Amino acid sequence: MKNSITERFIMSIPYNQLMLELKQKVSNAGLLRKAPTRGAIEILIVFSAFLITLFLVGEINPFLNALMMILVMIRSTYVAHDLIHNQYFSKHTDRQFSYFFGNFVLGLSANWWRYAHNLLHHIYTNVRSKDEDIKAVGGVFVGKRDWGSLFHNNQKYLYWLLLPFLSLSCLYQTLWFSIKHKRWIELLIVFAHFLIPLY
């Protein structure tokens, strides 16, 4: 009941106007300035680590090599996040790099994430009918039962069990979004991601 009342209240607020005002305040504080030097360094380091990891396949212990690739993919998540938020270079350049780190290295559509996270999550944060981020893992955070409280109270146990399903959920949403919006080239890059473990 409380969530329903809160959601009706939030949805009655002129969100666009509030977000524009907030964005202006954040911009005036200098928090939206781009960081091209940091971006270039991060991209160079992660890309180099990715190539080194591929080069070392068969040359070093496979478990050590797998650990290196895990670290590359984790760091790629942060790089892709910042690229999709346009924090490094121009909007066009960030978008091009996001296809490598998001679609190819991580196997998730950068444009799907840009839509679900940037547009829906950041404008309608935690509003159940709008925020795609809280619908992850088949709606574990929402629904008729109080899944949110169940997860919150037991997250130290459930987090690790749900994490693989989060990947599957994101992959499903990537495929659905790319097919629906006919983003065939982006979908091809996602499929190319699966050549990495094959290699």
Image (cartoon, helix red, strand yellow):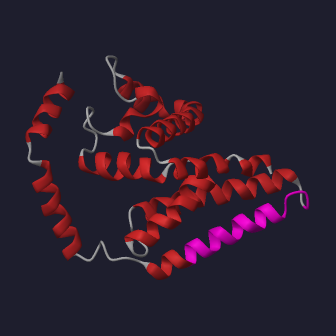
Percent of width and height locating residue 172: 52, 34
Q: Answer above or below: position of 1 versus 121.
A: above
Q: Which quadrant of the figure contains the N terminus?
A: top left
Res 74 quadrant in image: bottom right
Percent of width and height locating residue 76: 58, 60
Instruction: Identify the residue shown where x is 29% and y is 45%.
Output: 120
Instruction: Identify the residue shown where x is 52% and y is 66%.
Output: 97
Verify whether residue 56 appears in magenta: yes
Instruction: Identify the residue shown where x is 42% and y is 60%.
Output: 84
Res 7 quadrant in image: top left
Whether residue 119 sits left or right of residue 70 in the image: it is left
Q: Main secondary structure of the magenta part?
A: helix
Percent of width and height locating residue 154: 47, 29
Q: Answer above or below: position of 26 versus 107.
A: below
Whether residue 145 sits left or right of residue 151 in the image: it is left
Q: Residue furthest top?
A: 144
Q: Residue furthest bottom?
A: 37
Q: Answer above or below: position of 114 versus 97.
A: above
